Amino acid sequence: MTISTNSTDSGGLGGLSSDPDTIHGSVLQTAQVHADRVALRLRRGGRYADATYADLAGAIRSAAAALAEKGLRRGDVVGILSQNRPEWIVADLAVMSLGGIVVPIYHTLPESQLAYIVEDSGMRMLLAGDAGLQARAEDVKRETGCLDEIVSLDDARFRPGEASDADGPDAVNVASSDAATIVYTSGTTGEPKGVVLTHGNIVSNARALVGRYGITPDDSAVSYLPLAHMFERTCGHYVFLFAGGSIAYAQGLATVAEDVATVQPTVLIAVPRVLERAYESAMATIEKGPWIGRGVVHRAFSLLNERANRRYRGERVSPWLELRCRMYDALIASQFRRVGGGRLRLIVSGGAPLDRRVGKILRVLGFSVVEGYGLTETSPVVCCGDVADHRLGTVGKPLEGVEVRIAQDGEILVRGPNVMQGYLNKPEETARVLDADGWLHTGDLGEFLDDGNLSVTGRSKEIIVTSYGKNVAPASVEERVSRSQYVSQAVVFGDNRKSLVALIVPRFDALQRYAEERGLTWSTHESLIRHPEVEGLISGEIKKANATAASYERVVAFELLTEPFSEASGTLTPTLKVRRTKVAETCTDLIQAMYDKLDGKRAH
């Protein structure tokens, strides 16, 4: 496909365009209105240093001047290889203000994939974070021979609050129909594809989200998901920068809970795995308290859940139930809310299905939790829940201006201003997913419920077809298994087989408590999961999950793992989605052993 670089003129700020139909223009307009409000926050030396919108605008202007000096011109492709930091978003906006096209790159990518992206995109310049990433960039430059410049984000001209006040470069005419970014999908299978998104694609998506959730200058968020993914870039950054809100950068994934407690955000953008870990951590902390036992916590959940169910059904809540719930809310639920900083008015979960049990518990504890659905190809949001009428287990209703329909085979189709231009250098792939009427064929399966909320039931590419010809959506089976308090992760297999088997990563804190209460002897995670009573416990949990499933959707064998699936092992994407084919490849022997054992039982 041809990358669009049309042009229109508009007013500017310090020489830069502030056209509200472009991404950088929208942010610069916000800076004019909210110059003195805090835009970005970074923890340095144990405390947060704040940069205002005026500081941000100055840094964008300064960085744009630095990049123009390096020879960046309209239509040039520029990569950003860095961890999340204020300089990342400054570089992003500065490149776009010059008419450049940003390619965000996961800083954890192996060199071979980095080289592929550099060559496929025709990248001329690469902006790199710390010294280690700069060294990797230099290696790729030597290998590919197509990079002209490596620029360090440690340059003070990219740093809000420290950048020069000098005038920026001359304004460059950038239109909403111009390409803003090429985002390479990490994917769960196959070769990465470069998704070309325009300014208009992303601006329409971000503005619709600002409206749906009423984001204002008083809202704040903590950034910890990778900016190389559109979920964080649009929902965690552009949404807040368009509305005049503030963004604080977490020190790392391991410190998110601490950073959230310190920053006290009003909105949390999360993937399900992070919410599940936070819930598990909070439960473990509270249950170890000097006076609150597990029984008290579960009694609190039970009563708060009963009140929530009665309210949902429109039934009367008795004064006695209301009194006890208020007591438990003060003693138990409030502790959970403090873990979230105490000011959270909204949690938005996306990227993968949220465990319904965790979603329900968070609701019961007083959090407003909604789920959303989208793809890189849709900038990224297609649907998201509305706090007023969101139904757990669904991904809400389409965003304003976005059309969604379900094809005859159950595939979700999307059309709207947020849909990509196409895949870079892949016309056949583009034609396969974008039809003549502008409908994007997502490859996801779903259905609309009576209340208008969309339920995503699986991916057509991931559908398991058993040897009996039965179609099984593995995500729904895995969700049922993962409802157990003893299961952390589950991946199901069974393609061309008679039955389903599962690889399960246990919740070891819960298993250890179970073992301690029963006086079981164990020394390592391996010895714990091999204990007959523990295997029997998990077998019982699988039976519970199977109770509500059709016969062909039941898990008949499982294997417990000592190590979780992870990004480092290649079994999770950077947004913590399971790479099913990689898990199958890594655990081929374990999967085959389960089937060999089953065949042996059948033979006898």
Image (cartoon, grey):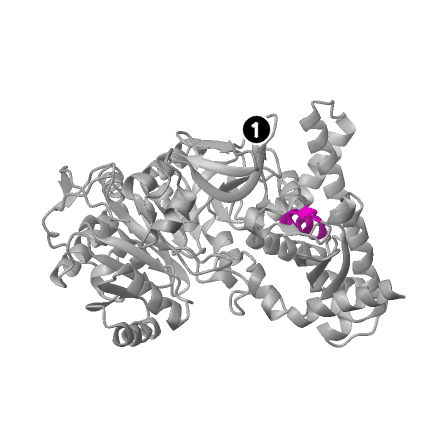
User: In the shown orientation, is residue 510 left or right of residue 111?
Assistant: right
> Which residue shows up at 48% across the image and 43% down it?
442
Q: Is residue 167 magenta?
A: no
User: Where does the image place residue 15, in percent across and percent down from the top left?
Assistant: 12, 46
Horizontal side of 241 relative to 442 (left or right) equals left
Where is residue 411 shown, x and y percent of the image?
Answer: 53, 39
Task: Please give the count of numbered marks on the rendered protein.
Answer: 1
- Residue 117: % across, % down: 34, 63
Q: Quadrant of residue 161?
A: bottom left
Picture quadrant where residue 116 is located: bottom left
The 10 Å Cα crowd at callout 1, few under 14, some 14 to 19, many 20 or more, is: few
Residue at the spot 54% in from the left edge and 69% down from the top edge: 569
Instruction: Identify residue type, mark 1.
Output: Asp
Residue 368 visible? no
Residue range in magenta is 469-481
- Which residue, given by chain and number where applicable, does mark 1 sit on? 389
Magenta part, dominant SS: helix
**Helix, strand or loop status at disc 1:** loop
Check if residue 476 falls in the magenta segment: yes
